[in-house]
């Protein structure tokens, strides 16, 4: 099969012909129809993720059809249209037993712990537990756009953030994660304030439901601006970027007993970001991480999409062929663009 392949971190990947994957007894192989290009792939390629062993094939936001089925798989058959959370749970650890497969103790992450979906085929493990069948009406591009970003935002807003109608929600960073969070929070009736550095992304945030925007460029005091807009601070604030500054701004923009959810990955020099612990105590703030969403939470999200309450297809900015993926991956830090780029292998 053809795949985006690299043997060295930070060196431009190439398109190579590599061996087709075969399914493990409890796994499947999916023919990839669409796969999202994500900042996590860029972090991996930069060498920020210790799980990645070289050589490597990236890609973790995939949709496609079942191409081969392991002998012990019971619920999936050839041709099924599917996607998968970026973390596949093992099914037998304490986290999986508690229904929290997204933080499984033995997690498999295609594109990180093993080869991923920037390829014609990808192997998935523990398929019965993790692979999600797609509604017939959902395109592969839209399903790939659920990726890690939309589903992680769904879990962050609904499950971890416990977002309620009428609440003020601040979303720091309007990339794929942030725009997803804005759409989801506003869809359930929250008032969302979008924060970013560019007016172009803020305009898209408004189109997706944001009530107000804050352009954080030029030394604007973001937390003060949000406290002014909300009459005292947001009930829920999400750092959708993953940066020391946005994490601090997010926590400082909360009202008393507010909830901060960290969704943007904190890697490299941001891994030990400082937080205002004095305020966290005085305001009784909650700080939570969000590491994706388990497969058994997908049906509620898919129902909201089927009803038109959520429209992830609006986040797809463009589609590119596999041959364009290496350059697009390498350029992510410079030109993230607005919305989600989908690769069609
Ligand atoms: Zn597990
Ligand atoms: Zn991702």
Image (tube, rainbow, N blue to C red):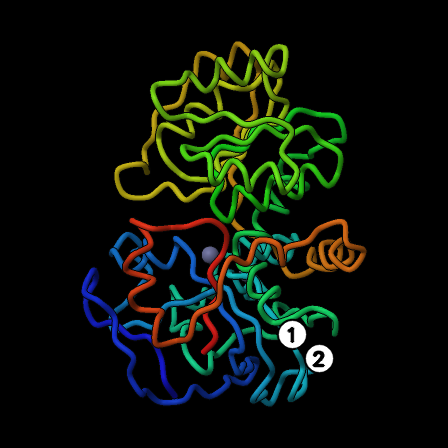
**What is the quadrant of residue 220 in the picture?**
top left
In this figure, which residue is indicated by the disc labeled 2?
A: 75
| Horizontal side of residue 47 vs 73, given as left or right | left
Q: Nearer the viewer, residue 158 or 118?
A: 118
Secondary structure at numbered mark 1:
helix
**What is the quadrant of residue 243 in the picture?**
top left
Percent position (x, y) of residue 72? 62, 85
Is residue 66 shown above or below 133?
below
Count of marks placed on residues: 2
- Give the alpha-carbon distance from disc 2 to disc 1, as whole Å: 6 Å
In this figure, which residue is indicated by the disc labeled 1?
A: 128
| Horizontal side of residue 241 vs 206, given as left or right | left
Percent position (x, y) of residue 38? 43, 57
Q: Residue at x 69, y 72 (%)?
A: 133
Q: Which of 171 and 341 is in front in this view?
A: 341
Percent position (x, y) of residue 42? 33, 56
């Amino acid at each position: 099969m053809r795949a985006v392949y690299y043997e060295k971190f930070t060196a431009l990947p190439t398109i190579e012909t590599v061996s087709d994957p075969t399914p493990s007894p409890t796994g499947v192989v999916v023919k990839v129809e669409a796969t999202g290009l994500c900042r996590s792939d860029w972090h991996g390629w930069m060498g920020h993720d210790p799980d990645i062993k070289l050589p490597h094939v990236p890609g973790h936001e995939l949709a496609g059809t079942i191409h081969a089925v392991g002998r012990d798989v019971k619920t999936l058959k050839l041709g099924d249209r599917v996607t998968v959370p970026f973390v596949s749970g093992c099914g037998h650890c304490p986290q999986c037993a508690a229904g929290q497969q997204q933080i499984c103790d033995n997690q498999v992450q295609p594109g990180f712990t093993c080869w991923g979906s920037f390829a014609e085929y990808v192997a998935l493990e523990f398929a019965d537990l993790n692979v999600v069948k797609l509604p017939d009406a959902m395109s592969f591009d839209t399903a790939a756009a659920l990726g890690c970003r939309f589903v992680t935002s769904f879990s962050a807003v609904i499950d971890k953030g416990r977002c309620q109608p009428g609440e003020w929600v601040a979303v720091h960073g309007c990339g794929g994660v942030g725009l997803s969070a804005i759409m989801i929070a506003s869809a359930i009736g929250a008032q969302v304030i979008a924060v970013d550095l560019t007016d172009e992304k803020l305009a898209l945030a408004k189109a997706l439901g944001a009530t107000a925007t804050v352009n954080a460029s030029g030394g604007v005091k973001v937390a003060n601006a949000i406290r002014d807009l909300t009459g005292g601070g947001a009930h829920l604030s999400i750092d959708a970027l993953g940066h020391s500054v946005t994490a601090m701004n997010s926590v400082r923009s909360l009202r008393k007993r507010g909830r901060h959810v960290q969704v943007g990955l904190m890697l490299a020099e941001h891994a030990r970001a400082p937080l205002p612990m004095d305020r966290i105590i005085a305001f009784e703030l909650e700080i939570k991480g969000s590491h994706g969403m388990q497969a058994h939470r997908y049906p509620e999200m898919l129902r909201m999409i089927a009803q038109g309450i959520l429209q992830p297809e609006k986040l797809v900015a463009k589609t590119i062929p596999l041959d364009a993926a290496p350059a697009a991956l390498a350029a992510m830090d410079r030109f993230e663009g607005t919305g989600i780029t989908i690769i069609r292998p």
